[in-house]
Structure formats: C-alpha cells, structure tokens
Image: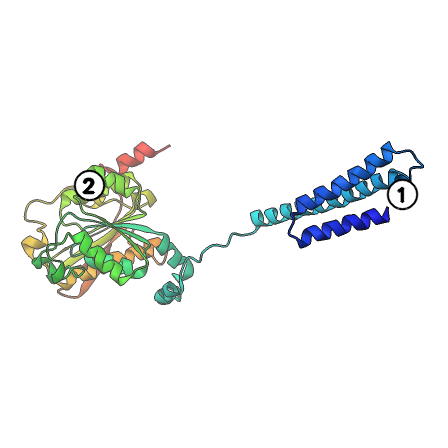
C-alpha cells in the first residue's frame, strides 16, 4: 500500500511540474484509488496483488474518508472566512470621500474659525441651494458673495442682457460681456471666483409656472427685482412652497431688506406691502436713478442674511425690516408682523392647517 501511495504522490508532483491542472491531477489520484478499491473487491483474499497492497479494502476506504474530512474542513473554513469578510464589509463604515478638498478648507478657513459658522455651518452652505431672482444691481453683489461664501448650488434667473448702462452698479458684469445674457455673464464671473460651486443659469422670464417649478428645488429665494408684479408673484409662490424669501429694494440713496418667512412665524411680503403703490410713489432705478454703491450695500446684506439663514448664525431679519439711508449714513430697524387679513399667507395657512 505504501508503494502505491508513493507512486501516486510522485505522479501528482510530476503533473504539477509539467503544469497539469489541479483538477486533472486529482482525477488521476481518484482513478488510482478507485482501481485499488475495485481490485480488492474483485480479487480473492490471497491474491498477490491484493496482499501487496494492504490485503484489505478497508484501509483504502479509511483513506478516502480522511481525505474527504480534510477537504470538507478546508471548504468550511473558506466559507466561514468569506462570510466574515462580507459581514465586516456590510457593517463597517463606508469609506466616504471628504466633503471638502484641501483647497476648499484653505478657501473657507476664515469661515470655519468663526464660532457661529465653523465646520458644520460651512457644510450647510456647501449643501444648500439658493435661487437668486435678477442678476442686476442687487443680484450682482449677492451672487458674488454667495459664490465666495461657498453656497453649493446657486440658481440665477433673468431674461435680460448686459447693457452699458448696467455697468455703473451691476458689478458682476463687465464691458466684455455687453450683449451677453446676464445669467451667463454672472455664471462666468461666479465660477471664475469659486470653481467649487455649481451655478444653474435660467435665461427666461419668471412666470408663475416657472416659479412654481423652480422654488421647490431650492432652500432659499433671494429677490432682487425692481417691479411689484414680480415681487408679488415671487412672494405668493414662496409662501405656497414654504420657502424663505429674502427681498430687498433700492432707489436713489435708500434701500430696505427683510426676510419673509410666514411658514416659520414671520410675515410675508404682502403683509407689509398689501397693494402696489400709486404711479410715481415708488419709481424704479431707471426712473429715479440710484447711486452706484447702494445696490452693493443692500445686495451684500442679502448675501449676509442668506448665510445666517442657512447656517443658523445670529438673528435674521425674520419679522423685521432694516432700512438704510446712504445719503446720511443712517439705518433703522422696524418690527414687522403678519396681517390677519393678508390675502396670501393667511389663505395658505388656512388651506394647510390640519
């Protein structure tokens, strides 16, 4: 029997040396074993071959059982190891890409050392979506500062093109972009300022259908338009979609700004301005003129209020209006309240009340 086992081992090693597959070498060993078992079963007990190979079939059967036991043990270990690896992969925390690159950490370092912003606040800015209506005097500084602050997704909607008369105050545009749609001119400057943000330009007029579709995609709306029809439309859809609205207005040397958020206890725009003023009482910038830096002041305030709203820092202008007089360097803050008879926010509250 020992001689047969040595021969089988030699054949196995020889097959390995010549590159014979493991399956083929095991098949040869299995054939030799089967031949031994059949020979022992077929030959008489005193046959010389049977005597020289052990004289009994039982050692060959025991050998097969030992080999099968070893094979089963190894197979069981492999299966247990595979299950352990799978379980560890399923329950171990996934290796996620860091939210901020090294370049972003360096860019926003001055934010992150502020106690009121820090890392969580900067994360909130990066994950936020803000829609700015109008890429004109107010929209220009607001868009630039939102981009610089790291607001992750910034939408801008405007149907106008850049004109030479805009450049006195609309600082996001340049002489080289005259004739270009304002949204694309703004996108170019914002992405040049901060390549880590996403700008979504909408070169179209804001109507009710567009407003209803867009507002649902954003966390915050900034309104820098200069006519009451659009302001009323923006306010109504913002109230319906429960989206906070920061709106500002300017003329000549003065400006005002507030956060309109009736879904969270503040008034809406129509609570404060229930009717459009009579002709001539609230002239546009084109009619009455505006000093160049004024939209920069109010537009920057819009961006600041947006950052506070998104990060939870400080106290916002919800329920208050800041009025700024640039000619005399004065500002005052007045309290605003919801009007019980407001045709916009109270109607919506009634419809959504349980």
| Colour scheme in use | rainbow
Q: Residue furthest front?
A: 48
Which of 343/206 is in front?
A: 206
- Report which residue position mark 2 lands on: 233
| Observer able to see residue 261 | yes
Q: Quarter of the image for the C terminus: give it.
A: top left
Closer to the eye: label 1 or 2 = 1
Name the spot of residue 101 as percent of width and height, x first: 40, 62
Find numbered disc 2 in the image and state the secondary structure of the residue it sits on: helix
Rendered image quadrant of residue 267: top left
Disc number placed over residue 54 in the picture, else none: 1
- Which comes before the other along the chain, label 1 or label 2? 1
Name the spot of residue 188 as percent of width and height, x first: 22, 58
Name the spot of residue 15 as percent of width and height, x first: 69, 50
| Residue at image location 86% in from the left, 33% down from the top | 41
| Observer able to see residue 253 | no
Horizontal relation, residue 347 to residue 81: left or right: left
Local crowd size for mark 1, using a 10 Å CA cut-off: few (<14), some (14–19), many (≥20)? some
Find numbered disc 1 in the image and state the secondary structure of the residue it sits on: loop
Which of 337/65 is in front?
A: 65
Rendered image quadrant of residue 240: top left
| Residue at image location 36% in from the left, 58% down from the top | 313
Q: CA distance from mark 1 to mark 2?
A: 101 Å
| Residue at image location 32% in from the left, 45% down from the top | 265
């Amino acid at each position: 029997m020992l001689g047969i086992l040595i021969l089988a081992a030699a054949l196995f090693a020889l097959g390995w040396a010549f590159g014979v597959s493991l399956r083929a070498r095991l098949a040869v060993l299995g054939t030799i074993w089967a031949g031994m078992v059949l020979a022992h079963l077929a030959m008489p007990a005193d046959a010389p071959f049977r005597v020289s190979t052990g004289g009994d079939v039982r050692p060959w059967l025991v050998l097969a059982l030992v080999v099968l036991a070893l094979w089963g043990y190894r197979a069981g270990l492999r299966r247990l190891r595979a299950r352990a690896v799978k379980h560890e992969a399923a329950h171990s925390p996934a290796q996620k890409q860091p939210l901020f690159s090294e370049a972003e950490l360096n860019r926003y370092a001055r934010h992150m050392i502020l106690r009121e912003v820090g890392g969580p606040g900067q994360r909130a800015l990066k994950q936020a979506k803000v829609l700015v209506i109008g890429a004109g005097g107010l929209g220009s500084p607001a868009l630039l500062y939102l981009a610089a602050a790291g607001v992750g997704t910034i939408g801008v909607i405007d149907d106008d093109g850049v004109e030479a008369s805009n450049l006195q105050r609309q600082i996001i545009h340049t002489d080289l972009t005259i004739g270009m749609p304002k949204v694309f001119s703004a996108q170019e400057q914002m992405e040049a300022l901060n390549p880590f943000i996403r700008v979504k330009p909408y070169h179209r007029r804001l109507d009710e259908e567009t407003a209803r579709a867009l507002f649902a995609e954003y966390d915050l709306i900034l309104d820098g338009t200069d006519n009451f029809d659009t302001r009323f439309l923006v306010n109504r859809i913002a109230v319906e979609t429960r989206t906070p609205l920061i709106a500002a207005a300017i003329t000549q040397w003065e400006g005002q700004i507030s956060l309109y958020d009736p879904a969270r206890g503040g008034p809406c725009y129509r609570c404060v301005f229930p009717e459009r003023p009579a002709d001539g009482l609230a002239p546009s910038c084109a009619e009455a003129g505006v000093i160049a830096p004024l939209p920069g002041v109010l537009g920057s305030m819009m961006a600041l209020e947006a950052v506070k709203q998104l990060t939870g820092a400080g106290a916002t202008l919800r329920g208050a209006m800041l009025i700024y007089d640039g000619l005399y360097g004065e500002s005052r803050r007045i309290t605003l309240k919801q009007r019980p008879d407001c045709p916009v926010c109270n109607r919506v509250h009634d419809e959504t009340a349980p």
